[in-house]
Image (cartoon, helix red, strand yellow):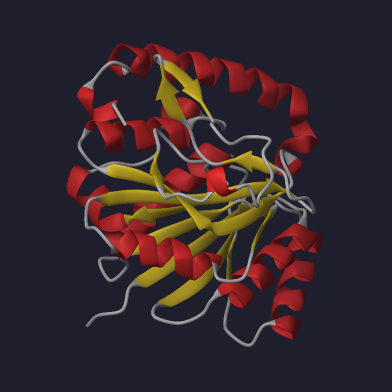
Amino acid sequence: MKYPYIGVFIPFKGECNFVLDCVYSIVNSYITGFSYFIVCYDDGSTEQELNYLWRSLKQNFPQDIVIVKNNNVEYTQAVHNITEYCKRDTNLDYLLLLNSDTKLHRGTFYSLVRRMTNNPYIAAVGGKIIKMGTNEIQHTGTRLENKQIVDPYCGLDINNPETNQVERRLWVNGCATLYNLRILRKENLNFSLEFKPAYFEEADLMTELNIRGYSVLYEPRAVIEHKLNATMNKDRERYEIAFWKNWDVYKSKWEPYYGSKQLAF
């Protein structure tokens, strides 16, 4: 039996202590049953920040962790580039994309991978996203109710039994998602650059995967802490404008499909 091979990519810009916490949580979350590597994908950090990160990674982690330097291409372009690179490497089975301001609870990495391997038609898996340092659920992914997008468990306690079932989703939050590269290669899909600089690029991709007959799943045993918008704070006004612009782009593209049988779950 071939174990899955997974590329873990963390796009970041500065905030290197977030990156280090994220890497530590990945290593600590790993159990067994697959192999992986980690790439910290820089998006315009200073040389001082990169030197600090490189030294800290070398001092604290035994495995080689790569830093790839870019010239401030911004988030949607960054994840597009990462996905295109991973699709070309046919040895890679899955891609785990993590925001730098996330921390995986122990066993989360394994839970995401195990869920993905259960069915070849699972295209993406996300977990139970909670606010950093709390038990409050921030995201569990969205579904349609009366043709309206809802996140059914937002604001509930992490231990609420209602939140503990594996469920299909229209999309799961892109701050921590495992993607099936075999499907992305087969369907020739990637994050659309119409959603630059950021926001709703993952919603667009996962909605299309649903429309094409694949599944996007919420896996409650995967728990991820997230410091909401920490990576966007340096240019908040521009990203708020991008959020609402891209929300309109998403709705105009996909609202006509809200009544389709592919999204009836």
Residue 108 screen position, x and y as percent: 54, 65
Can the viewer see residue 176 in this picture?
Answer: no
Instruction: Using the image, determine if residue 3 lies above or below residue 83.
Output: below
The residue nearer to you, when weighing 179 against 47, is 179
Q: For residue 235, what is the image quadrant?
A: top right
Q: For residue 87, what is the image quadrant?
A: bottom left
Looking at this view, name the residue that lies furthest to the bottom.
62
Residue 14 screen position, x and y as percent: 75, 53
Instruction: Using the image, determine if residue 159 lies above or below residue 252.
Output: below
245 left or right of 5 in image? right
The residue nearer to you, when weighing 28 against 232, is 28
Residue displayed at 66% across by 69% down: 25
- Position of the N terminus by quadrant: bottom left
Residue displayed at 30% across by 32% down: 208
13 left or right of 180 in image? right
Residue 71 screen position, x and y as percent: 60, 47
The residue nearer to you, when weighing 125 against 146, is 146
Looking at this view, name the residue that lies furthest to the front.
161
Residue displayed at 32% across by 55% down: 180
The residue nearer to you, when weighing 193 against 19, is 19
Can the viewer see residue 134 in this picture?
Answer: yes
Residue 213 screen position, x and y as percent: 20, 38
134 left or right of 126 in image? right
Residue displayed at 25% across by 80% down: 2
